[in-house]
Image (tube, rainbow, N blue to C red):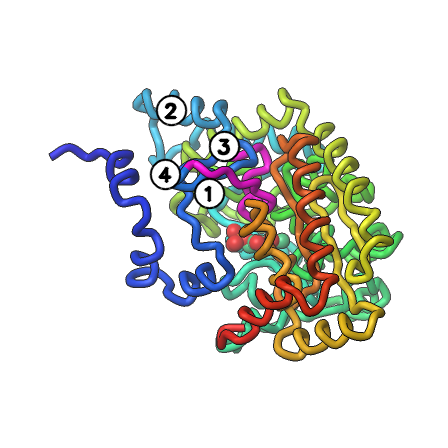
Amino acid sequence: MSFDIVKTFRQRLGENYTLHTKYVNPAWATVTQLIGYDKVYAKAEGCYLWDQDGKRYLDCVSGFCVSNIGHNHPIVRQALRDALNESLPNLIQLDCSLLSGLLAEALIKRIPWLEMVFFANSGAEAIEAAMKFARCATGRPRLLYANQSYHGVTYGALSVTGHAMWREGFEPLVPKTHAVPFGDSEAIERELDAGDVAGVLLEPIQVGAGIIDPPDGYFARVESLCRKHKALFIMDEIHTGIGRTGTFLASEQWNIKPDIICLSKGLSGAMVPVSAVVTRKDIMKGVYSRLDRSCIHASTFMGNNLAMIAGLATLHVLDTENLLTRCREMGDYLMKALKPFEEKYELVKAVRGRGLLVGVELGIPESFSLRQAWTMMHKINPGLFAQALTIPLMEEHAILTQVAGHNEDVLKVAPALVVTQADIDDFAGSLDTVLKAAHSFPGPFWDVSKRLASNALF
Ligand SMILES: Cc1ncc(COP(=O)(O)O)c(C=O)c1O
């Protein structure tokens, strides 16, 4: 019997949710059903998804900023196919592979103040490496991170994730990790004064906290404090990097040069898991300090051919399709389309973002009945209202969106960088309709919300 995965995919498509309920994660399968996200996607291209019946959806989630260059980009697919058509050496382990050297070279070209790259397989793994590198290279124990941050859920990464919800049931965590308020450089200075801080880990934009920008001057101050106190400045660009905010790294927009940069998500071309820790030679030398420590931090699949090819092809696409410029143009267009909602709708508090990473923040309305409905919903669950907005966007407008983080009143809009003006018009028009419905209480919008609220999961 031959192995025909495409045939199997087509034959069994539709069993997704029963298989997951039985074998993978029943809680998640139930959540998708509750919010009407239990679609059976059959195809993905660019910023669109198609279900089994051929209905098209606009993807404004991009797999949490994985598909920056769009789903199934033909150049990434072709590069992977080309490589698979050859019998290339892969995962030999006891050599130095060419493709990982090439991707490291290509990343350093784009981040010229840094010199070396460690590859891994996921965002959290990159954070783990950055934490270990900082401790090892400085010989100091403490790591600072920001309140409300998100850096992943493996033990190291979870220990520097400031959002308490992620920790419940998993403590105790890694010691000598210390939270400071995001945006407060004086708090960082006070901790650095102790002289035992290895590194300060931040996100350029706190995506999971509601797409929060730092206050003016914050990063420059943190950078100079780190230099002064000989602590490493570590930037988590896992969500914001690879062009998402209109520059290759979001950090570029503050003119800072962190000592360690973590990348993942978008580097994969939405195809093969990969992450990269980009750093300086002296930091790497501090870790791989002797020949008998040449593999002291490693991972079996780091630098595997398919991941490296997906990364190289993604960088090629970013350049040849001019996607950074396009991201800025489409980001401006999106912002212009959404900004008027701040005035038009009392439920909209602010529209903010950079490039194609945009948040629509909702806030308590003025009028009496709406205010009551808002308060009631927030009492049941603080994250419910923003989640309720995603439901009609999906059900009535075939648009996939998600909230920015847990219990945040922020709708996140992050389509692939190949999104068109027509897509943005579609999104903005649909959100306009949904917001209009949300301003009518009682009304169908609030009935859907009540349905959500009445379920035990929320
Ligand atoms: C900023 C940031 N850091 C780290 C991670 C963890 O990445 P992964 O889920 O690949 O472990 C994420 C994932 O969403 C992230 O957004």
Residue range in magenta is 54-72
In the image, 57: left or right of 256? left
- Whole-angstrom CA distance, mark 1 to mark 3, is 18 Å
- Whole-angstrom CA distance, mark 1 to mark 4, is 18 Å
Please determine whether, in this image, residue 9 is positioned above or below residue 219: above
Q: Closer to the N terminus: mark 1 or mark 4?
A: 4
Q: Nearer the viewer, mark 3 or mark 2?
A: 3
Ligand 1 contact, mark 1 (Cβ < 8 Å)? yes
- Whole-angstrom CA distance, mark 2 to mark 4, is 23 Å
- Binning the other alpha carbons within 10 Å of mark 1 as few (below 14), some (14 to 19) or many (20 upward) gives many
For numbered disc 3, what is the local secondary structure? strand
Q: Nearer the viewer, mark 2 or mark 4?
A: 2
Q: Which residue is under mark 1? A: 273
- Looking at the image, the residue that sits furthest to the left is 1
Q: Residue 77, located in which quarter of the rendered image? A: top left
Q: Closer to the N terminus: mark 1 or mark 3?
A: 3
The reply to whether the magenta stretch includes residue 63 is yes
At 72% from the left edge and 55% from the top edge, which residue is drawn? 435
Q: Amino acid at mark 4?
A: Gln
Rendered location of residue 348, percent (x, y) = 78, 58
Rendered location of residue 147, percent (x, y) = 71, 67
Please determine whether, in this image, residue 263 is positioned above or below residue 88: below
Q: Closer to the N terminus: mark 2 or mark 1?
A: 2
